[in-house]
Image (cartoon, coloured by chain):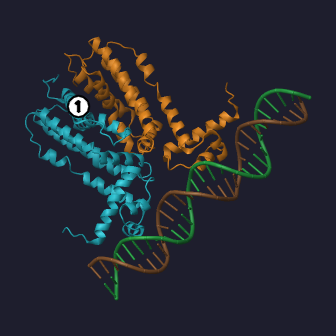
Chain colours: A orange, B cyan, C green, D brown
Amino acid sequence: MVEEGRTARKRGAIVEAARKLFLRNGYAGTSMDEVAAHAHVSKQTVYKNFVDKQSLFTELITSDIGQIEGPEHPLIEGMPHTDDVERDLRLFARHHLSIVMRPDLLRMRRVIIGEADRFPELAQAWYQNGPVRSAMLFATWFQALHERGLLHVDDPEMAAQMFNWLVLSIPVNCAMACPLDETLYSDEELDRIAAEAVRVFLAAYGPKGSASRR
Amino acid sequence: MVEEGRTARKRGAIVEAARKLFLRNGYAGTSMDEVAAHAHVSKQTVYKNFVDKQSLFTELITSDIGQIEGPEHPLIEGMPHTDDVERDLRLFARHHLSIVMRPDLLRMRRVIIGEADRFPELAQAWYQNGPVRSAMLFATWFQALHERGLLHVDDPEMAAQMFNWLVLSIPVNCAMACPLDETLYSDEELDRIAAEAVRVFLAAYGPKGSASRR
DNA sequence: AAACGAGTACTGTCCCGTCTAGTACTGAAA
DNA sequence: TTTCAGTACTAGACGGGACAGTACTCGTTT
């Protein structure tokens, strides 16, 4: 099982090199020669595995988009679902943040946004698999909490989006414009943002009586 | 005054063409020949006005970034500053939204994010002149409202950022991944988002007693 | 006259994708 | 285990085209 055969190994090296280069230098900024050299593979091998530069790019990104599918799904499923909604939300928000703020995912976000005009279907796939999927999960979650009287949401879709961006917006939007090599936000800052986001969210969508205020 | 001289007119045409092409096709996706042709100008003239492709790009974007400085400044200054904070906030949020959602500004956001690795100082300039400057304006505004007892903000910086992204996040993040030629959000949807953003904001940062809930 | 600009050809570079000639691996038969 | 065919891989060259930036000639504006 560890044995993959030579071809698969080569292909893996190509994909790995391509990922690194595409995410760092963008589509136009990456040449196939670079990919081949970086993968310690001849250019011919690259073209044996991928018909095109476009194909290499889209297959790679598409596959990566698919990989993201699932970091928060099990988390919501396996959520403690205690009655301490604030604690649950904060834990989840913090976890969500630490995933989305992974440098490789931030780079991917940048590349996809930058190429959104040239690869619109890719951008769509990413958007649907990322923000939209998250929002839908949140919406069902909040709907359930609403029915248990632990939240008060008239429009679960809207609340879900608000929650998502309350948590993510500040650091993600900063990361879009800032160099990613240094650490942008410390763990403590992310903690603080997650906590405040949850506080704001609960102030607006908490159960009727409780106005949590610090 | 309307007369600008031939040179200035040519230069203007070049900048205009370059803006259109760079914002639509990105930096690498735009050639100097295209710019010249689109400006009805010879390539030599382009190089008489701008030493470089890089220079053309950075000077253009930098100048555009400078232009944005001021759409909301006068608005806050000339704000009615009634005691109906919710109304003021909602009007302002709606106005802010309609500016930031202008297609050309969305395109600029895309390009800057996409080239953030290759033009980090540009990305920084944009970030400072956009989100950071907005947040600082909001912060002083909220601070003043706090002192008048119309808001309750312990951390004006944080509140300002939260407000900014509560209003903008949903449509802006969608616009990053979606084709910009068709209209993404109707005026009514933007109204709704602005209203909900203000509601959430006031629930969290409104004056102590009032829990505005719909 | 003097500067400016148009038009166009040109240089050098980069890069995609292909081709060729030769080498290494793999798996099965002898 | 050795042999051997078939396949994968290497290294490098190359055609074709795009493009940044320059050179040069001739017309136009001021």
**Mark 1: which secondary structure?**
helix
Judge whether A161 appears above or below C12 on screen. above
Q: In the rendering, at what x and y percent does residue A123 appear? A: 42, 37
Q: Is residue A214 left or right of residue D22?
A: left
For the question of whether residue A1 can be seen, the reply is: yes
Residue A42 visible in image: no
Residue nearest the observer in this picture, B52 or C27: C27
The answer to which quarter of the image holds residue A116 is top left
Question: Callout 1: few (<14), some (14-19), or many (20+) C-alpha neighbours within 10 Å?
Answer: many
As rendered, which of C23 and B204 lies closer to the eye?
C23
Horizontal relation, residue B165 to residue C25: left or right = left
Q: Quadrant of the N terminus of chain B?
A: bottom left
Report the quarter where the C terminus of chain B lies: top left
| Residue occupying the point 39% across, 14% down | A80
User: What is the quadrant of residue B48 in the picture?
Assistant: bottom left
Return the x and y of residue A8 as percentages of the image width and height: 66, 33
Picture quadrant of residue B183: top left
Residue at image coords 26%, 17%: A151
The residue that appears at 30% across and 31% down in the rendered structure is A166
A190 relative to A212, above or below:
below
Query: In the figure, A79 relative to B190: above or below?
Result: above
Residue type at mark 1 is Ala
Return the residue at label 1. B197
* Image side of residue B142 versus residue B50, left or right: left
Picture mark count: 1
Most foreground residue, D30 or A13? D30
Residue A1, percent from left and from top: 67, 24
**Please, which chain is the residue tagged with disc 1 on?**
B
Residue A77, x across and y down, in percent? 42, 16
A49 sits left or right of A28 in the view: right
